[in-house]
Image (spheres, grey):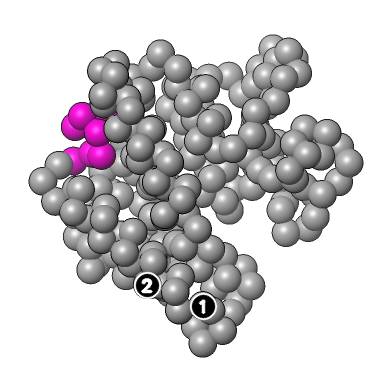
Amino acid sequence: MDRFRIYGDTRSGNCLKVKWTAERLGLAHDWIDIDVTSGETRRENFLALNPAGQVPVLERPDGRTLAQSNAILLYLAEGSDLVPADPFDRAKMMEWLFWEQYSHEPYIAVRRYQKRFLNKADSEIDPDLMARGRRALGVMELRLIARDYFVDEALSLADIALVAYTRLAHEGGFDLSEFPAVGGWVRRVESDLGIAHAQMEPS
Protein backbone atom coordinates (compact mmCIF):
# COMPACT_ATOMS: atom_id res chain seq x y z
CA MET A 1 0.00 0.00 0.00
CA ASP A 2 1.52 3.33 -1.05
CA ARG A 3 -1.48 5.51 -0.17
CA PHE A 4 -3.17 6.66 3.00
CA ARG A 5 -6.33 4.91 4.04
CA ILE A 6 -9.03 6.95 5.74
CA TYR A 7 -11.72 5.02 7.58
CA GLY A 8 -14.85 7.06 8.13
CA ASP A 9 -18.59 7.52 7.88
CA THR A 10 -19.66 10.23 5.40
CA ARG A 11 -22.58 11.17 7.65
CA SER A 12 -20.09 12.33 10.28
CA GLY A 13 -18.70 15.85 10.21
CA ASN A 14 -15.61 14.65 12.07
CA CYS A 15 -14.92 12.22 9.24
CA LEU A 16 -15.79 14.60 6.43
CA LYS A 17 -13.36 17.26 7.60
CA VAL A 18 -10.54 14.72 7.26
CA LYS A 19 -11.75 13.76 3.79
CA TRP A 20 -12.02 17.41 2.70
CA THR A 21 -8.53 18.20 4.00
CA ALA A 22 -6.95 15.26 2.17
CA GLU A 23 -8.74 16.29 -1.03
CA ARG A 24 -7.85 19.98 -0.63
CA LEU A 25 -4.18 19.03 -0.28
CA GLY A 26 -4.26 16.52 -3.14
CA LEU A 27 -3.09 13.64 -0.93
CA ALA A 28 -3.40 10.18 -2.46
CA HIS A 29 -5.75 8.19 -0.28
CA ASP A 30 -8.41 5.51 -0.25
CA TRP A 31 -11.66 6.17 1.59
CA ILE A 32 -12.91 3.13 3.52
CA ASP A 33 -16.58 3.61 4.37
CA ILE A 34 -17.50 2.57 7.90
CA ASP A 35 -21.13 2.48 9.05
CA VAL A 36 -21.03 3.52 12.69
CA THR A 37 -24.71 2.71 13.20
CA SER A 38 -24.29 -0.98 12.28
CA GLY A 39 -21.60 -1.76 14.83
CA GLU A 40 -18.65 -1.85 12.41
CA THR A 41 -16.48 0.17 14.77
CA ARG A 42 -16.90 -2.51 17.46
CA ARG A 43 -15.62 -5.38 15.33
CA GLU A 44 -12.24 -6.93 16.01
CA ASN A 45 -10.64 -5.82 12.74
CA PHE A 46 -11.58 -2.19 13.32
CA LEU A 47 -10.61 -2.21 17.00
CA ALA A 48 -7.15 -3.34 15.87
CA LEU A 49 -6.92 0.04 14.09
CA ASN A 50 -8.42 2.09 16.90
CA PRO A 51 -9.12 0.42 20.26
CA ALA A 52 -11.43 3.34 21.13
CA GLY A 53 -13.82 2.14 18.41
CA GLN A 54 -14.26 5.56 16.82
CA VAL A 55 -13.95 7.07 13.37
CA PRO A 56 -12.16 8.67 11.65
CA VAL A 57 -8.93 6.71 11.55
CA LEU A 58 -5.97 7.42 9.29
CA GLU A 59 -3.79 4.47 8.31
CA ARG A 60 -0.37 5.34 6.92
CA PRO A 61 1.30 3.31 4.15
CA ASP A 62 3.64 1.85 6.81
CA GLY A 63 0.67 0.61 8.84
CA ARG A 64 0.81 3.16 11.63
CA THR A 65 -2.58 4.61 12.55
CA LEU A 66 -3.83 7.92 13.90
CA ALA A 67 -7.23 8.70 15.42
CA GLN A 68 -9.04 11.86 16.58
CA SER A 69 -10.16 14.06 13.71
CA ASN A 70 -8.28 17.25 14.56
CA ALA A 71 -5.04 15.35 15.25
CA ILE A 72 -5.40 13.82 11.77
CA LEU A 73 -5.99 17.27 10.27
CA LEU A 74 -2.81 18.61 11.85
CA TYR A 75 -0.80 15.65 10.61
CA LEU A 76 -2.10 15.82 7.04
CA ALA A 77 -1.70 19.58 6.73
CA GLU A 78 1.81 19.86 8.20
CA GLY A 79 3.75 22.40 6.14
CA SER A 80 0.76 23.38 3.98
CA ASP A 81 -1.06 26.68 3.55
CA LEU A 82 -3.82 25.38 5.83
CA VAL A 83 -1.51 25.87 8.83
CA PRO A 84 -0.42 29.49 9.43
CA ALA A 85 3.33 30.08 9.35
CA ASP A 86 3.21 32.69 12.11
CA PRO A 87 3.56 31.00 15.55
CA PHE A 88 0.80 33.07 17.16
CA ASP A 89 -1.62 32.50 14.27
CA ARG A 90 -0.81 28.80 14.37
CA ALA A 91 -1.57 28.71 18.09
CA LYS A 92 -4.79 30.67 17.46
CA MET A 93 -5.80 28.04 14.88
CA MET A 94 -5.20 25.31 17.45
CA GLU A 95 -7.22 27.28 20.00
CA TRP A 96 -10.21 27.03 17.66
CA LEU A 97 -9.53 23.34 17.00
CA PHE A 98 -9.64 22.63 20.74
CA TRP A 99 -12.73 24.81 21.19
CA GLU A 100 -14.53 23.02 18.36
CA GLN A 101 -14.21 19.64 20.07
CA TYR A 102 -15.00 20.92 23.58
CA SER A 103 -17.58 23.69 23.12
CA HIS A 104 -19.14 23.16 19.68
CA GLU A 105 -19.28 19.53 18.54
CA PRO A 106 -20.66 18.14 21.85
CA TYR A 107 -23.80 20.25 21.44
CA ILE A 108 -24.43 20.93 17.75
CA ALA A 109 -23.34 17.50 16.52
CA VAL A 110 -25.01 15.62 19.36
CA ARG A 111 -28.34 17.40 18.92
CA ARG A 112 -28.17 16.75 15.16
CA TYR A 113 -27.51 13.06 15.80
CA GLN A 114 -30.42 12.75 18.19
CA LYS A 115 -32.86 14.47 15.83
CA ARG A 116 -31.74 13.04 12.51
CA PHE A 117 -30.52 9.55 13.34
CA LEU A 118 -32.40 8.70 16.53
CA ASN A 119 -35.57 10.53 15.36
CA LYS A 120 -36.11 12.10 18.77
CA ALA A 121 -38.69 14.82 19.20
CA ASP A 122 -37.50 18.13 20.63
CA SER A 123 -39.28 17.30 23.88
CA GLU A 124 -37.09 14.20 24.25
CA ILE A 125 -33.80 16.05 23.82
CA ASP A 126 -31.91 17.76 26.64
CA PRO A 127 -32.74 21.48 26.21
CA ASP A 128 -29.20 22.32 27.29
CA LEU A 129 -27.94 21.07 23.92
CA MET A 130 -29.87 23.81 22.11
CA ALA A 131 -28.80 26.49 24.59
CA ARG A 132 -25.13 25.57 24.45
CA GLY A 133 -25.19 25.06 20.69
CA ARG A 134 -26.67 28.53 20.19
CA ARG A 135 -24.04 29.93 22.53
CA ALA A 136 -21.32 28.33 20.38
CA LEU A 137 -22.83 29.83 17.24
CA GLY A 138 -22.93 33.19 18.99
CA VAL A 139 -19.22 32.97 19.77
CA MET A 140 -18.56 32.20 16.11
CA GLU A 141 -20.76 35.09 15.00
CA LEU A 142 -18.77 37.56 17.11
CA ARG A 143 -15.52 36.27 15.63
CA LEU A 144 -16.79 36.49 12.04
CA ILE A 145 -18.65 39.81 12.05
CA ALA A 146 -15.64 41.71 10.72
CA ARG A 147 -13.56 38.93 9.17
CA ASP A 148 -13.86 36.26 6.48
CA TYR A 149 -12.04 33.42 8.24
CA PHE A 150 -11.20 32.45 11.78
CA VAL A 151 -7.44 33.01 11.58
CA ASP A 152 -5.23 35.36 9.58
CA GLU A 153 -7.89 36.13 6.93
CA ALA A 154 -7.16 32.90 5.08
CA LEU A 155 -8.65 29.40 5.02
CA SER A 156 -7.07 27.23 7.72
CA LEU A 157 -7.76 24.00 9.53
CA ALA A 158 -9.83 26.02 12.02
CA ASP A 159 -12.38 26.78 9.29
CA ILE A 160 -12.46 23.21 7.99
CA ALA A 161 -12.94 21.78 11.48
CA LEU A 162 -15.68 24.22 12.40
CA VAL A 163 -17.61 24.16 9.14
CA ALA A 164 -18.16 20.39 9.21
CA TYR A 165 -20.97 20.41 11.76
CA THR A 166 -21.93 24.07 11.49
CA ARG A 167 -23.13 23.61 7.89
CA LEU A 168 -25.37 20.78 9.15
CA ALA A 169 -26.60 22.58 12.27
CA HIS A 170 -30.06 22.94 10.72
CA GLU A 171 -30.44 19.16 10.99
CA GLY A 172 -30.23 19.64 14.75
CA GLY A 173 -32.86 22.37 14.70
CA PHE A 174 -30.50 25.36 14.78
CA ASP A 175 -31.40 28.33 12.59
CA LEU A 176 -28.30 29.88 11.00
CA SER A 177 -30.35 32.80 9.69
CA GLU A 178 -30.01 34.13 13.24
CA PHE A 179 -26.22 34.17 12.71
CA PRO A 180 -25.68 35.87 9.34
CA ALA A 181 -21.91 36.18 9.61
CA VAL A 182 -21.69 32.45 10.33
CA GLY A 183 -24.00 31.67 7.40
CA GLY A 184 -21.87 33.75 5.02
CA TRP A 185 -18.71 32.10 6.28
CA VAL A 186 -20.20 28.63 5.76
CA ARG A 187 -20.89 29.48 2.11
CA ARG A 188 -17.39 30.88 1.70
CA VAL A 189 -15.68 27.80 3.12
CA GLU A 190 -17.91 25.43 1.16
CA SER A 191 -16.87 27.24 -2.02
CA ASP A 192 -13.20 27.13 -1.02
CA LEU A 193 -13.44 23.38 -0.48
CA GLY A 194 -15.54 22.75 -3.59
CA ILE A 195 -18.33 21.02 -1.67
CA ALA A 196 -22.08 21.33 -2.15
CA HIS A 197 -23.84 24.13 -0.31
CA ALA A 198 -25.95 22.98 2.63
CA GLN A 199 -29.50 24.32 2.91
CA MET A 200 -28.91 25.71 6.45
CA GLU A 201 -32.62 25.87 7.25
CA PRO A 202 -33.81 24.12 10.41
CA SER A 203 -35.52 20.78 9.94
Which secondary structure, mark 2? helix
Is residue 149 rendered magenta in the image? yes
Q: Quadrant of the C terminus?
A: bottom left
Expressed as whole percent of the image width and height from the top left, the position of residue 178 reads 23, 68
Expressed as whole percent of the image width and height from the top left, the position of residue 63 reads 75, 18
* Residue located 14% across and 51% down the image: 145
Q: Which residues are magenta?
A: 148-156
* Residue located 42% across and 55% down the image: 104
Kind of residue at disc 2? Ala
Which secondary structure, mark 1? loop
Q: Tell me the tag on residue 131.
A: 2
Q: Tell me the tag on residue 16.
A: none
68 left or right, relative to 51 = left
What is the quadrant of residue 159 in the picture?
Answer: top left
What is the quadrant of residue 68 in the picture?
Answer: top right
Magenta segment main secondary structure = loop
Q: Is residue 44 above or below residue 171?
A: above
Q: Is residue 191 among what the camera can see?
A: no
What is the quadrant of residue 31 in the picture?
Answer: top right
Q: Are marks 1 and 2 in contact (CB under 8 Å)?
A: no
Residue with the mark numbered 1 = 126
Residue found at the very far left of the displayed protein: 146
